[in-house]
Image: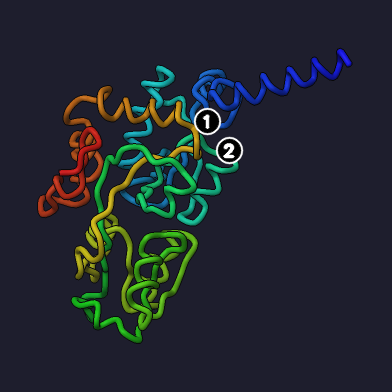
Amino acid sequence: MKKLIVLLLASVLAVSAFASGKGDSGGSIARIKKAGVVRIGIFADEFPFGYVDNQGVYQGYDVYFARRIARELLGDENAIEFVPVEPANRVELLQSDKVDIQLANFTVTPARAEVVDFTLPYQQVSIGIVSPDSAPITEISQLEGKELIVDKGTTQETYFTEHYPGIKLVKYDSISAGFAAFKDGRAAARAQDNTLVFAWAVQNPGFSATIGSIGPKDTIAAAVRKGNKELLDWINNLITNGLEDDFFHKNYEATLRPVFGPNVNPESVVVEHGVVK
Protein backbone atom coordinates (compact mmCIF):
# COMPACT_ATOMS: atom_id res chain seq x y z
CA MET A 1 0.00 0.00 0.00
CA LYS A 2 2.82 2.36 0.94
CA LYS A 3 4.54 1.61 -2.38
CA LEU A 4 1.32 2.39 -4.25
CA ILE A 5 0.96 5.73 -2.50
CA VAL A 6 4.56 6.64 -3.37
CA LEU A 7 3.98 5.76 -7.02
CA LEU A 8 0.77 7.80 -7.12
CA LEU A 9 2.51 10.78 -5.54
CA ALA A 10 5.35 10.56 -8.07
CA SER A 11 2.83 10.50 -10.91
CA VAL A 12 1.03 13.55 -9.56
CA LEU A 13 4.30 15.45 -9.22
CA ALA A 14 5.34 14.53 -12.76
CA VAL A 15 2.03 15.68 -14.19
CA SER A 16 2.23 18.90 -12.20
CA ALA A 17 5.74 19.61 -13.45
CA PHE A 18 4.68 18.97 -17.04
CA ALA A 19 1.64 21.24 -16.75
CA SER A 20 3.65 24.06 -15.22
CA GLY A 21 6.25 23.90 -17.98
CA LYS A 22 9.01 23.44 -15.38
CA GLY A 23 9.72 19.78 -15.89
CA ASP A 24 11.55 18.20 -18.79
CA SER A 25 8.61 18.60 -21.17
CA GLY A 26 9.54 19.43 -24.76
CA GLY A 27 10.48 23.03 -25.36
CA SER A 28 10.36 24.16 -21.71
CA ILE A 29 12.82 26.88 -20.78
CA ALA A 30 14.27 24.77 -17.98
CA ARG A 31 14.94 21.89 -20.38
CA ILE A 32 16.48 24.24 -22.96
CA LYS A 33 18.79 25.81 -20.38
CA LYS A 34 19.76 22.43 -19.02
CA ALA A 35 20.63 21.25 -22.52
CA GLY A 36 22.50 24.48 -23.25
CA VAL A 37 21.04 24.65 -26.74
CA VAL A 38 17.73 25.69 -28.28
CA ARG A 39 16.41 23.60 -31.18
CA ILE A 40 15.00 25.85 -33.87
CA GLY A 41 13.25 24.65 -37.01
CA ILE A 42 14.46 26.53 -40.08
CA PHE A 43 14.35 26.17 -43.84
CA ALA A 44 17.66 25.18 -45.40
CA ASP A 45 16.67 26.20 -48.93
CA GLU A 46 14.50 29.32 -48.68
CA PHE A 47 16.87 32.07 -49.73
CA PRO A 48 17.09 34.73 -48.30
CA PHE A 49 14.98 33.82 -45.24
CA GLY A 50 16.52 30.54 -44.16
CA TYR A 51 19.25 28.81 -46.13
CA VAL A 52 22.68 27.20 -45.89
CA ASP A 53 25.47 29.18 -47.56
CA ASN A 54 28.49 27.82 -49.43
CA GLN A 55 30.38 27.40 -46.15
CA GLY A 56 27.59 25.30 -44.67
CA VAL A 57 26.42 28.11 -42.35
CA TYR A 58 22.75 28.98 -41.84
CA GLN A 59 21.89 32.49 -42.99
CA GLY A 60 18.82 34.66 -43.61
CA TYR A 61 16.11 36.80 -42.06
CA ASP A 62 14.76 34.00 -39.86
CA VAL A 63 18.27 32.94 -38.85
CA TYR A 64 19.13 36.49 -37.78
CA PHE A 65 16.16 36.40 -35.37
CA ALA A 66 16.99 32.86 -34.24
CA ARG A 67 20.48 33.89 -33.20
CA ARG A 68 19.08 36.77 -31.14
CA ILE A 69 16.70 34.35 -29.40
CA ALA A 70 19.62 32.10 -28.49
CA ARG A 71 21.64 35.06 -27.24
CA GLU A 72 18.84 36.30 -24.99
CA LEU A 73 17.86 32.83 -23.77
CA LEU A 74 21.26 31.18 -23.35
CA GLY A 75 23.79 34.03 -23.55
CA ASP A 76 25.30 32.73 -26.79
CA GLU A 77 23.90 33.36 -30.28
CA ASN A 78 25.52 30.13 -31.46
CA ALA A 79 23.80 27.97 -28.84
CA ILE A 80 21.37 26.71 -31.50
CA GLU A 81 20.69 23.37 -33.08
CA PHE A 82 19.20 24.30 -36.43
CA VAL A 83 16.76 21.62 -37.53
CA PRO A 84 16.10 21.71 -41.30
CA VAL A 85 12.38 21.49 -42.09
CA GLU A 86 10.06 21.28 -45.07
CA PRO A 87 6.78 23.22 -45.32
CA ALA A 88 4.63 20.16 -44.64
CA ASN A 89 6.39 18.93 -41.48
CA ARG A 90 6.65 22.11 -39.43
CA VAL A 91 3.69 21.23 -37.17
CA GLU A 92 4.70 17.59 -36.83
CA LEU A 93 8.22 18.47 -35.64
CA LEU A 94 6.80 20.66 -32.89
CA GLN A 95 4.24 18.08 -31.82
CA SER A 96 6.84 15.29 -31.71
CA ASP A 97 9.26 17.45 -29.69
CA LYS A 98 11.95 17.48 -32.39
CA VAL A 99 12.18 21.29 -32.18
CA ASP A 100 11.52 23.87 -29.47
CA ILE A 101 10.67 26.76 -31.80
CA GLN A 102 9.65 26.94 -35.44
CA LEU A 103 11.08 29.92 -37.33
CA ALA A 104 10.61 28.51 -40.83
CA ASN A 105 8.78 31.45 -42.45
CA PHE A 106 5.61 30.15 -40.77
CA THR A 107 2.46 31.98 -41.93
CA VAL A 108 -0.21 32.30 -39.25
CA THR A 109 -3.54 30.68 -40.17
CA PRO A 110 -6.59 29.73 -38.06
CA ALA A 111 -6.10 26.03 -38.88
CA ARG A 112 -2.47 26.05 -37.79
CA ALA A 113 -3.31 28.04 -34.65
CA GLU A 114 -5.46 25.11 -33.54
CA VAL A 115 -2.45 22.80 -33.39
CA VAL A 116 0.47 25.11 -32.51
CA ASP A 117 0.81 28.33 -30.53
CA PHE A 118 1.99 31.32 -32.55
CA THR A 119 3.89 34.24 -31.11
CA LEU A 120 3.31 37.84 -32.12
CA PRO A 121 4.27 38.40 -35.78
CA TYR A 122 7.64 39.66 -36.97
CA GLN A 123 6.93 39.77 -40.73
CA GLN A 124 4.02 40.33 -43.10
CA VAL A 125 3.49 38.63 -46.43
CA SER A 126 1.07 37.74 -49.21
CA ILE A 127 1.16 35.29 -52.11
CA GLY A 128 3.22 36.18 -55.18
CA ILE A 129 3.53 34.64 -58.65
CA VAL A 130 6.69 34.29 -60.69
CA SER A 131 6.58 33.41 -64.38
CA PRO A 132 8.91 33.31 -67.40
CA ASP A 133 9.54 36.56 -69.23
CA SER A 134 8.79 34.65 -72.43
CA ALA A 135 5.26 33.84 -71.26
CA PRO A 136 4.36 36.20 -68.41
CA ILE A 137 1.38 35.51 -66.18
CA THR A 138 0.03 38.92 -65.22
CA GLU A 139 -3.55 37.89 -64.36
CA ILE A 140 -4.69 34.84 -62.41
CA SER A 141 -7.25 34.11 -65.13
CA GLN A 142 -4.33 33.25 -67.43
CA LEU A 143 -3.61 30.21 -65.26
CA GLU A 144 -7.00 28.56 -65.82
CA GLY A 145 -6.34 25.08 -67.19
CA LYS A 146 -2.58 25.50 -66.72
CA GLU A 147 -0.17 24.12 -64.17
CA LEU A 148 0.97 26.12 -61.16
CA ILE A 149 3.69 24.89 -58.81
CA VAL A 150 3.02 25.18 -55.06
CA ASP A 151 4.54 23.60 -51.96
CA LYS A 152 2.68 21.05 -49.88
CA GLY A 153 1.40 22.28 -46.54
CA THR A 154 1.51 25.98 -47.45
CA THR A 155 -1.00 28.81 -47.56
CA GLN A 156 -0.50 28.91 -51.33
CA GLU A 157 -1.73 25.32 -51.68
CA THR A 158 -4.78 26.06 -49.55
CA TYR A 159 -5.62 29.35 -51.28
CA PHE A 160 -5.53 28.06 -54.84
CA THR A 161 -7.31 24.83 -53.93
CA GLU A 162 -10.20 26.77 -52.39
CA HIS A 163 -10.48 29.70 -54.81
CA TYR A 164 -9.20 28.50 -58.19
CA PRO A 165 -10.15 24.85 -58.79
CA GLY A 166 -9.57 25.34 -62.52
CA ILE A 167 -5.82 25.75 -61.98
CA LYS A 168 -3.85 22.51 -62.01
CA LEU A 169 -1.66 22.46 -58.91
CA VAL A 170 1.68 20.68 -59.08
CA LYS A 171 2.80 20.09 -55.50
CA TYR A 172 6.32 19.64 -54.16
CA ASP A 173 7.62 18.69 -50.72
CA SER A 174 10.52 21.12 -50.70
CA ILE A 175 10.78 24.74 -51.77
CA SER A 176 14.01 24.23 -53.71
CA ALA A 177 12.54 21.27 -55.61
CA GLY A 178 9.53 23.38 -56.56
CA PHE A 179 11.67 26.20 -57.91
CA ALA A 180 13.96 23.76 -59.75
CA ALA A 181 10.94 22.14 -61.41
CA PHE A 182 9.55 25.54 -62.38
CA LYS A 183 12.88 26.65 -63.85
CA ASP A 184 12.88 23.37 -65.77
CA GLY A 185 9.62 24.38 -67.46
CA ARG A 186 7.24 22.00 -65.69
CA ALA A 187 4.59 24.65 -65.06
CA ALA A 188 3.38 27.98 -66.35
CA ALA A 189 4.08 29.74 -63.05
CA ARG A 190 5.26 29.30 -59.48
CA ALA A 191 3.47 30.54 -56.36
CA GLN A 192 5.14 31.26 -53.03
CA ASP A 193 5.36 34.04 -50.47
CA ASN A 194 5.76 37.26 -52.43
CA THR A 195 8.94 38.11 -50.54
CA LEU A 196 10.51 34.82 -51.59
CA VAL A 197 9.27 35.28 -55.16
CA PHE A 198 10.88 38.76 -55.32
CA ALA A 199 14.21 37.31 -54.22
CA TRP A 200 14.11 34.32 -56.56
CA ALA A 201 13.27 36.45 -59.59
CA VAL A 202 16.21 38.77 -58.87
CA GLN A 203 18.54 35.78 -58.74
CA ASN A 204 17.20 34.13 -61.90
CA PRO A 205 17.34 36.19 -65.13
CA GLY A 206 14.54 35.39 -67.55
CA PHE A 207 11.91 35.25 -64.82
CA SER A 208 9.92 38.02 -63.12
CA ALA A 209 7.57 38.43 -60.20
CA THR A 210 4.64 39.22 -62.46
CA ILE A 211 1.98 39.20 -59.73
CA GLY A 212 3.36 40.77 -56.59
CA SER A 213 0.40 40.20 -54.30
CA ILE A 214 -2.70 38.03 -54.37
CA GLY A 215 -5.03 36.80 -51.68
CA PRO A 216 -5.14 37.97 -48.08
CA LYS A 217 -2.35 39.79 -46.32
CA ASP A 218 -0.86 37.41 -43.80
CA THR A 219 1.64 37.55 -40.98
CA ILE A 220 4.59 35.31 -40.17
CA ALA A 221 5.43 34.38 -36.61
CA ALA A 222 7.42 31.96 -34.52
CA ALA A 223 5.55 28.91 -33.23
CA VAL A 224 5.90 26.66 -30.21
CA ARG A 225 4.28 23.41 -29.17
CA LYS A 226 0.60 23.79 -28.29
CA GLY A 227 0.20 24.68 -24.61
CA ASN A 228 3.82 25.72 -24.05
CA LYS A 229 2.76 29.04 -22.53
CA GLU A 230 6.06 29.56 -20.76
CA LEU A 231 8.13 29.65 -23.93
CA LEU A 232 5.39 31.47 -25.85
CA ASP A 233 5.25 34.26 -23.26
CA TRP A 234 9.05 34.50 -23.18
CA ILE A 235 9.29 35.00 -26.97
CA ASN A 236 6.39 37.49 -26.97
CA ASN A 237 8.07 39.48 -24.22
CA LEU A 238 11.30 39.49 -26.22
CA ILE A 239 9.46 40.79 -29.30
CA THR A 240 7.55 43.51 -27.42
CA ASN A 241 10.08 44.60 -24.80
CA GLY A 242 13.43 42.93 -25.31
CA LEU A 243 14.43 44.14 -28.77
CA GLU A 244 15.52 47.57 -29.90
CA ASP A 245 12.88 49.55 -31.79
CA ASP A 246 14.44 48.89 -35.19
CA PHE A 247 15.66 45.31 -34.67
CA PHE A 248 13.76 43.81 -37.61
CA HIS A 249 14.61 46.78 -39.85
CA LYS A 250 18.27 46.08 -39.09
CA ASN A 251 17.56 42.44 -39.90
CA TYR A 252 16.01 43.51 -43.22
CA GLU A 253 19.00 45.70 -44.09
CA ALA A 254 21.45 42.88 -43.34
CA THR A 255 19.65 39.98 -44.98
CA LEU A 256 16.96 41.14 -47.43
CA ARG A 257 17.86 44.51 -48.94
CA PRO A 258 21.03 43.16 -50.61
CA VAL A 259 18.75 40.70 -52.42
CA PHE A 260 15.56 42.71 -52.96
CA GLY A 261 17.34 45.92 -53.97
CA PRO A 262 15.83 49.41 -53.64
CA ASN A 263 12.45 48.73 -55.26
CA VAL A 264 10.89 46.78 -52.37
CA ASN A 265 9.62 48.89 -49.48
CA PRO A 266 10.78 47.33 -46.17
CA GLU A 267 7.56 48.53 -44.54
CA SER A 268 5.70 45.97 -46.66
CA VAL A 269 7.74 43.19 -45.02
CA VAL A 270 8.91 44.22 -41.56
CA VAL A 271 6.84 44.09 -38.37
CA GLU A 272 8.32 45.64 -35.22
CA HIS A 273 7.22 44.75 -31.66
CA GLY A 274 4.47 42.48 -33.03
CA VAL A 275 2.40 45.41 -34.34
CA VAL A 276 1.29 45.29 -37.98
CA LYS A 277 0.87 48.79 -39.44
Name the residue: 10% across, 54% down: 263
Q: Earlier in the sequence, mark 1 or mark 2?
A: 1
Secondary structure category for the residue under label 2:
loop
User: As drawn, which residue projects farthest toward the top?
Assistant: 2
Name the residue: 57% across, 27% down: 19
Label 1 to label 2, Cα distance in Å? 7 Å
Quadrant occupied by the N terminus: top right
Instruction: Name the quadrant containing residue 164.
Output: bottom left
Give x and y (percent) for residue 125. 25, 53
Residue 81 appears in the figure:
no
Give x and y (percent) for residue 27. 52, 30
The residue carrying mark 1 is 27
Name the residue: 49% across, 23% down: 29
Give x and y (percent) for residue 189. 31, 74
Q: Amino acid at mark 1?
A: Gly
Between 232 and 54, the one lying in front of the other is 232
Mark 1 touches mark 2? (CB < 8 Å):
yes
Secondary structure category for the residue under label 1:
loop
Return the mark for residue 97.
2
Image side of residue 178 versus residue 208, left or right: right
